[in-house]
Image (tube, helix red, strand yellow):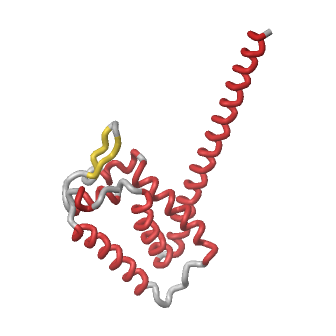
Amino acid sequence: MRPVGQTPTETADYAALSALYGMLLGATAATSRGREPVPRGEVPVLAAATFALSKLIVHEKVETWLRRPFVDERDDGRRPKGRRLRYAVGELLTCTRCTGAWSALALAALRLHAPGTGRTVTTVLAASAGSDMLHAGFSWLCAGANTRRHDAELTGRELSSAA
């Protein structure tokens, strides 16, 4: 990530985003007083849901409409567009860790203020994250098997040509 001096932003732009996040976090904390806290056993589900939601927002084609005002998407990659706050939001929407912090806040607030709905949403998103991990694992296993088969074929050819 480039320093602020090398982007078309000002420190105040990032401060505005931080202040907004802080206000939303504070409002969530203040309005959740007296509510049943999120059980610790649900934190891994929230983490997986946060992973899936931030990946969806930052990387998936279906969310292009959300990124389009802030992110220029080209064949050679994504870049924030505009200047000042617009550019800073574009940076946020191209970073899964950054978007993940906002996603976690939204999902935790939803879980605290509408527990049933929050559980449903986080379950769906966590299942999506699990599916992503299973697909990645399957692709990794297939790639390894293909590499081993290719290596075995090369070794077989080398042995037959040496004989």
Q: Front-most of 12 and 132?
A: 12
The single residue placed furthest to the right in the displayed view is: 163
Q: Front-most of 163 and 135?
A: 163
Q: Residue at x 40, y 53 (%)?
A: 58
Q: Front-most of 160 and 56?
A: 160
Is 46 on the left-hand or right-hand side of 105? right
Is 111 on the left-hand or right-hand side of 140? left
Number of numbered callouts drawn: 0
Is 38 on the left-hand or right-hand side of 84? right
Q: Residue at x 73, y 24 (%)?
A: 152
Residue 149 position, x and y percent, is 71, 26
Residue 141: which quarter of the image?
Answer: top right
Residue 60 position, x and y percent, is 42, 47
Is 35 drawn above or below residue 157 in the view shown?
below
Residue 156 position, x and y percent, is 75, 18
Is 156 on the left-hand or right-hand side of 49? right
Is 145 drawn above or below residue 61 in the view shown?
above
Q: Residue at x 65, y 42 (%)?
A: 138
Q: Residue at x 40, y 55 (%)?
A: 57
